[in-house]
Image (cartoon, rainbow, N blue to C red):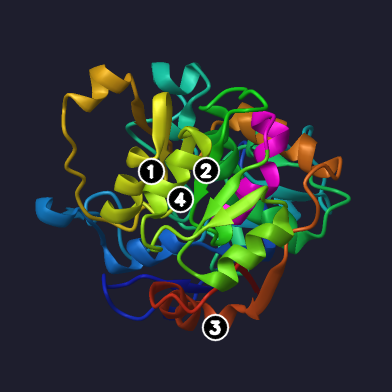
Amino acid sequence: MRSFKVTAFGGALADTQSETPVPTGTQVLLKIAACGACHSDVHIRDGFFDLGSEGRMDLSRGVPLPMTPGHEIAGEVVALGDAAAEMLSVGDTRVVYPWIGCGTCETCASGDEQLCRKPRNLGVNVDGGYSDHVMVPHPRYLVPFDPMPITEACTYACSGLTAFGALKKLGTLGEGDPLVIIGAGGVGLAAVRLAESVTGVAGIAADISSDSREAAMMAGARDVLDPSAPDAMRNFVKGTGGAAGVVDFVGSAESARFGFDILRKGGSLVIVGLFGGSLVLPVPHFPLREVTIRGSYVGSLPEFHELMDLARSGRFGPVAVETRSLDQADATLYDLKDGRVSGRIVLVP
């Protein structure tokens, strides 16, 4: 089995060879056909999240090394443990739900495994998809994706699910309720495509890049705006009355502050992005404007099934992806880190 592993935080991924594992019990061995490259993989390789004035969030205790990153995984079942044989067959193709919990705590029992305090997330806490095989602990984490292309299906496991979970936190919006999606990268574009199906209204995409704004319009945005333009916040609020909902897929101090400032009274800001930094806000704004700020982390397994059912129906249109060979994994992470990627990159073993 060939894998590209993090062996030292901040260093290059190591091209490694090892024995292909044999599944037991409920385990399922998947031969990987596609694995999306996600910006969070950059943070995992570097070993920290930037917290701005609060320093860094050290990932070394939660990410044991060596570890194979990659959590947007799809492939073919090639071997099954005895207890999994009645639920799947060799040759089945599936996309993996990677946000796996301990399976025994109250959080997992409630269906929110992604929030488990003892996670077994593929590509984060245990070996993931920058490889030609991956071990999945139970068939319930394997979801059908036909008739979608496999290189598209894998992206729903994180970018699609992250966008879906964030939009669902806003609930159903009215026709006159402006929805702003900050950041038109891979996850933001997924939100643009999903917005009307999830919230009832098409989103307005905000991005400092003209190319990204153009991509958002092609993906179905109602309108676009440039947050860096003079008086962008003032002009937006004057023209619309303020946003009912904002989802920030950048997660920088600047993007979060822009999202907060354009909210109308009673509006909600959902922060998803992990770019980093600190946000300082006047406390009186919260009671006087009755605004809400909350975070959103990927989505639950039931939400993933809901999302994949919608995706398989063709509701969202095709996802544009660039495929690269697995041996370009490390170079791809540097491209992501340096902002040289527009859209989605999928690694193919």
Residue type for callout 3: Gln
* Residue 330 sits inside the magenta stretch: no
Check residue 328 in the rendering and tell me which mark sits there, or answer none. 3
Disc 2 marks which residue? 180
Disc 1 marks which residue? 259
Which numbered disc, 4 or 3, marks the residue closer to the eye? 4
Q: CA distance from mark 1 to mark 3?
A: 35 Å
Q: CA distance from mark 1 to mark 4?
A: 10 Å
Disc 4 marks which residue? 249
Residue type for callout 1: Gly
Depth check: give the residue in front, 328 or 242.
Answer: 242
Mark 3, secondary structure of its residue: helix
Task: Find residue 145 and report its horizontal and vertical position in percent.
Answer: 79, 47
Mark 2 surroundings within 10 Å by alpha-carbon count, few (fewer than 14), some (14 through 19), many (20 or more): many
Q: Which residues are magenta?
A: 187-201
Mark 2 in CB contact with mark 4 (< 8 angstroms): no
- Decide which of tag 4 and tag 3 comes sooner along the chain: 4
Which numbered disc, 1 or 3, marks the residue closer to the eye? 1
Which numbered disc, 3 or 2, marks the residue closer to the eye? 2
